Image (tube, grey):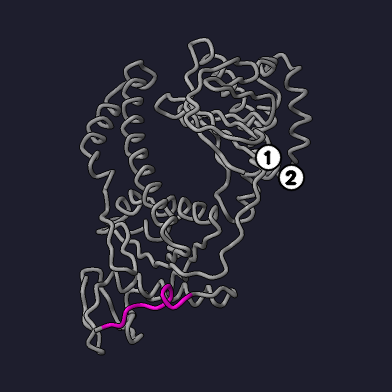
Amino acid sequence: MKANKYRIHPNTEQMEKLSIQFGCARFVYNDALAKKRDFWNSGAYNISRFELQAMLKTMKQDLDTVWLKKAHSQVLQSALLNLDKAFTNFFQGRAKFPRFKKKNQKQSIQYPQSVKIESDKIYLPKVGWVKCVVHRQFEGKVKTVTISKSPSGKYYASVLIDNGLVEAKPIKHIEKVVGLDMGIHDFIADSHGNKTPNPRFLNKQLSNLKRKQQNLSRTKKGSKGRANARLLVAKAHEKVAFARNDFQHKLSKILADENQAVMIEDLNIKGMTKNRKLARHIQDLGWHGFSAKLGYKLKAQGKHLVKIDRWYPSSKTCSCCGHKQETMPLNIRNWQCQCGAIQDRDVNAANNIANQGIIKLKADGYTVSASGGMRKSCE
């Protein structure tokens, strides 16, 4: 299963039709969420997705909600399916309690069937043929198409494809490994001594964002000027997000191509952002998004992403002799161990992460060659 995301350019009439689809799906989602919440608060049994689907049929016949017939039936059923998944993630501890969808946020709908894609257009039920920039061709069966509208007003089609290919088998004998230490001054430092500086995408646009957000705060709610100001703010945030994604994709591609196993720390990002002085910088880095991109790129080639326990003292421990320092404040960037080795804080942590990852791989039954598993001796 692979997903490709394409930019689509609906005309004015198609935008209105998509707006109807978005609005109906949002109404059904919020209505179902309200019903499930009321059942929960009243102490009654939980209402299932299938019961909500039965109610949906009645709603289409009700005079107050007969306009739901303008939406494609599978779009409305997909909204209920997404709500069901949201509650599953909540009860299994992977997400917070589902929230109501708002009109000015990102809008999305799903078509599980009846979508056709050609060289420069895509067919959407109850919308028609929409101009589409198919920049990447694909082979396989289209499973689901998700149409979304970003806060900046751009439309996208995310196409999930079953290409029929067999998933790559994990590489058993590993020859090339690297450990990564993620930081704020440098985005990553690896166990080979290389460092990638932090691009600081948000800081570069901070003054621009501040000015546009101040202009937005001065506008009157519900006015046309406020809608235009909100659009400018959304475009500024989108520019930052696009630059960050481009950087992460390119860097993760290089790491996945050059190594057979990459070791990183399983960071507690949610806890780290509670530090008010560092929260903005940590969120700007996008560590979670980077590790996710790196993970699926490695998996596609049968390679390994190994996550090290977040409590392992990688910065305090000397990678040469294993001695653990009692304290290691953030302002100390270089230090000398009792064994005489002079350590760079980030590179030393990356070496320790690589060593722990090798131990974990061997425990899982993989073999690591001497060239991939041994570091140069410390001087």
Observer-nearest residue: 65 or 151?
A: 151
- Compared to residue 71, the image places residue 138 above or below, namely below
Q: Main secondary structure of the magenta part?
A: loop
Could one spot residue 103 in this view of the protein? no
Amino acid at pointer 2: Asn
Vertical relation: 34 (above or below) 220: below
Residue drawn at (25%, 89%) of the image: 338
**Secondary structure beneath disc 2?**
loop
For label 2, count other residues whose C-alpha is less than 10 Å away and answer few (under 14), some (14-19) or many (20+): few
Q: Residue furthest bottom?
A: 339
Task: State the image coordinates of residue 33 (x, y, percent, origin top left).
Answer: 63, 37
The CA distance from mark 2 to mark 1 is: 7 Å
- The quarter of the image holding the N terminus is top right
Seen in the picture, residue 5 relative to 346 is either above or below; the reply is above
Which residue extends farthest top?
13
Counting the numbered discs, the total is: 2
The residue at which mark 2 appears reads as 46
Residue at x 58% of width, y 31% of height: 146
Please provide the residue range marked out in magenta: 369-378
Residue holding disc 1 = 36
Image quadrant where residue 34 sits: top right
The residue located at (61%, 59%) in the rendering is: 169
> The C terminus lies in which quarter of the figure?
bottom left
Q: Are marks 2 and 1 in contact (CB under 8 Å)?
A: yes
**Residue 372 image point, x, y percent:** 43, 72
